Image: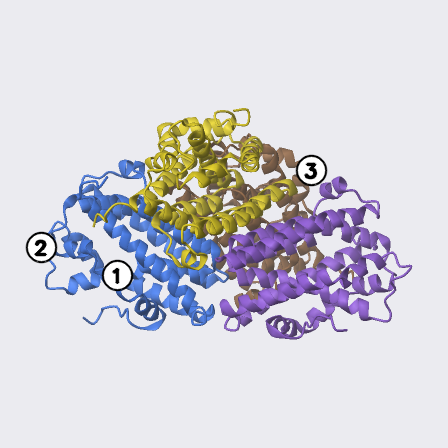
Chain colours: A purple, B yellow, C brown, D blue
Amino acid sequence: MSTSIDFDTGFFGRLRAAAGDEWTGYVSHPFVRALGTGSLPEACFRRFLVQDYLFLTQFARAYGLSVYKSTNLADIRAAAAGVEAVLAEIPLHVGYCAGWGLDEASMAAEPEAPETMTYTRYVSDVGHTGDILDLTVALMPCVAGYAEVGQLLLADPATVLDGSPYGAWLRNYDSEEYKTSVRTALDKLEDLSRRYGGEARFESLSRIFLTATRLETAFWQMGLDAARPEPR
Amino acid sequence: MSTSIDFDTGFFGRLRAAAGDEWTGYVSHPFVRALGTGSLPEACFRRFLVQDYLFLTQFARAYGLSVYKSTNLADIRAAAAGVEAVLAEIPLHVGYCAGWGLDEASMAAEPEAPETMTYTRYVSDVGHTGDILDLTVALMPCVAGYAEVGQLLLADPATVLDGSPYGAWLRNYDSEEYKTSVRTALDKLEDLSRRYGGEARFESLSRIFLTATRLETAFWQMGLDAARPEPR
Amino acid sequence: MSTSIDFDTGFFGRLRAAAGDEWTGYVSHPFVRALGTGSLPEACFRRFLVQDYLFLTQFARAYGLSVYKSTNLADIRAAAAGVEAVLAEIPLHVGYCAGWGLDEASMAAEPEAPETMTYTRYVSDVGHTGDILDLTVALMPCVAGYAEVGQLLLADPATVLDGSPYGAWLRNYDSEEYKTSVRTALDKLEDLSRRYGGEARFESLSRIFLTATRLETAFWQMGLDAARPEPR
Amino acid sequence: MSTSIDFDTGFFGRLRAAAGDEWTGYVSHPFVRALGTGSLPEACFRRFLVQDYLFLTQFARAYGLSVYKSTNLADIRAAAAGVEAVLAEIPLHVGYCAGWGLDEASMAAEPEAPETMTYTRYVSDVGHTGDILDLTVALMPCVAGYAEVGQLLLADPATVLDGSPYGAWLRNYDSEEYKTSVRTALDKLEDLSRRYGGEARFESLSRIFLTATRLETAFWQMGLDAARPEPR
């Protein structure tokens, strides 16, 4: 496909390669595969949608932090566009959730799952501990990972769109606007990695990326666990 | 005037009253009065315009920090609107500066004056030390002070608009859009002061407001000093 | 006992009361009760010891943040004493762990459990979002909770000290030096709550305290889960 | 002298060389030279002592921030030693100031000079914007610059120790304990520059170092200005 995104190259490609099986385990998690085939129990998806709503609020805060951590206007504008993109996504997400019988007030009143808290507060802590490159790397498993999941599923013959309850959700990942936003984020990472010594700091950045990837995997698992009887 | 802003009431009114003569000294600084009558030397205004450009970059970062420090969507949206407002003001400021022979590249290359650094980094430090109410209070002398200056000058019979080199700049402060943004900021402060214990913390918030007022006064003085021979 | 600590009074008492059953569930968690009777599987305690080692590093960082967030010398000295206390505890903890066959290098190499990350990064995020009172409240379930656990167990006739593998650990909580440090922390909270509008902000502080209490409970549960077969 | 510190080598040496004349202007500022010969008006030194007291409080906070920004125990311990060193210096400074008729309460009540605020809040902002290497670089003109000033003056035949009101102050810089602490700080910078990609980020770190050097120079000038009639 001419418009597919290349996740193998550049600084992102290096981080992704270094995460190895952990990355593969994240983008092809059982939650994701069941989403593609349409076999995911609806309780799992609903759990995911609610926590994703709570996640987006924290995600907007993280981009706000990267506005602060920017030191020139171009970086500030890019980070501010990230805030705006998340804030624009929230009403779309809420509208979509309404179709699943979930209203905004009750989603906002739901407690954050531990998995939601762990990833979002880890990102916040990395952001405050390090610089804008550290923060950006911590956000990438979310930003690029969802795009890769979408691209993988849409290219997979096992994926069911028509007739699946998840078809509309999956089709979102095929919009040019969405893909452009992901490419812009990958370019920004490339740019930051050059200006902030990414190569020289590869080992510690790679640890951040790997940890964030694990926490995203746990987020999928949290969705999946909604269909299992409580183990305790 | 039916549309004038009331700076005397509410939590802002209390902070302003507590700052007393320091507030009056800020909003009726010699720089401001000379701006109104048109007698300000152009070198002073040019100095002010360049440093104000550099100031706006830091100001956008401060609003980015308040996006992060927000804990609900309404506050995040309000803070993000602050980021966007500053980012929208920059090209207007640049366009205006062009009329004074100042191009963006040379303004961006100019070193920040100590007065620009002191206020902006003080705001940043207050923001990181305290919560969103502390940060908002540190920003208010800028947000509301410029509006009060504009309102005072536009109501002052000594003010010259037509034929003054500063007439166009002064008229900006008369737009309904601008006044609405200032009223929104005053309302936000009121709201935050209620939710974050503003009354109980009045003394320390008042100290922040007073310090920020002094640093804004020093910013006007920095402009005025551009017309004086270097004392050293 | 004349030297027992009173957890019912003051600002801490109010936070604790507001946390209700969640607080009781934390300080009398099955992990804690099994620790007292000596029936806790050793694998659980070992898991706890390793994660507690990793926790202490993050805890020292949190006190470092509260040094920064202090605005007068007395607060800075109190927070710095917190950093020093944690740093002094680490070699004691390491020495104790050696008796359980755990060496420092392998503990440091162990990945942080999600439960360790969630609580520590939540504290960090609260600290950056709010002021020193918010941060201190987020730390209290750890600081005061362990002391209350110790006091409860040492007063409980069901508790076994002699002959229990956990007797030495439990006796730590009976030292006057330890109790003094806890009383100092409770006094500091009282002082900060007065100076930073604690009453006016009680609702949001109470939410922080409750969330931190839940995350501490999850930390005990993480220890307990070490004895269960993996549910996945 | 066998125990002199080498400021020319390593990562610090590169930053110092890049700062060129600005560095020389700082370490051989007229305030410094007059201090050496004993010709500095006492009002200047008194102004310096009071502001240095206020500076130390902010300096302790900055080291607190570097405790937080550390990600391993060795770095945490080094940063915590920085906090402790500053806190230990304060009573010595207060004791010394008493000899000049300055008591702690009145120094603490004195407003921070703009020059004190600019440097300390700049350091804070750099610390929050960047990582621990950025923060450390922002602190180096203070940490190493005072040591170089001391070493230069003590080696300068023009320097008067006996009979000068500043002799005791200058002799402080000759203690082995002090020099060891400075060498430790230089070694820490070297270590951090290796682990955090210092070479790859040299340009931006050099800008931070240069700005901090200028702000330290302004701090000396603030002292010197105490002997001049107010220019306004």
Q: Specify whether residue C187 is in view.
A: no
- From mark 1 to mark 3, how far is it between C-alphas? 57 Å
Q: Which mark is residue D162?
A: 2
Q: Which of the two marks, 1 or 3, is nearer to us in this view?
A: 1
As measured in the structure, the alpha-carbon distance from the residue carrying label 1 to the one carrying label 2 is 20 Å
Residue at point 66%, 66% (across, down): A183
Can you give x and y, in whole percent of width and height, for residue B23 in the image? 39, 31
Q: Residue at x 32, y 54 (%)?
A: D215
Residue closest to the far front: B163
Circles 1 and 2: CB atoms closer than 8 Å: no
Question: Image check: D67 left or right of A207?
Answer: left
Q: Do dots 3 and 2 share one subunit? A: no
Residue occupied by mark 3: C21
How busy is the neighbourhood of tag 1: few (under 14 within 10 Å), some, or many (20 plus)?
many
Helix, strand or loop status at disc 2? loop
Q: Which residue is mark 1?
A: D147
Query: Which is more N-terminal, label 2 or label 1?
Result: 1
Q: Chain of mark 2?
A: D
- Labelled disc at residue D226: none
Q: Chain of mark 1?
A: D
Q: Is D162 displayed left or right of A177 in the figure?
A: left
Give percent across and percent down for residue B92: 51, 48
User: How far, Cα to Cα, is label 3 from label 2?
Assistant: 71 Å
Residue B24 placement: quadrant: top left
Residue at (86, 71) in percent of width and height: A157
- Look at the picture and state if D67 lies above or below D188: above
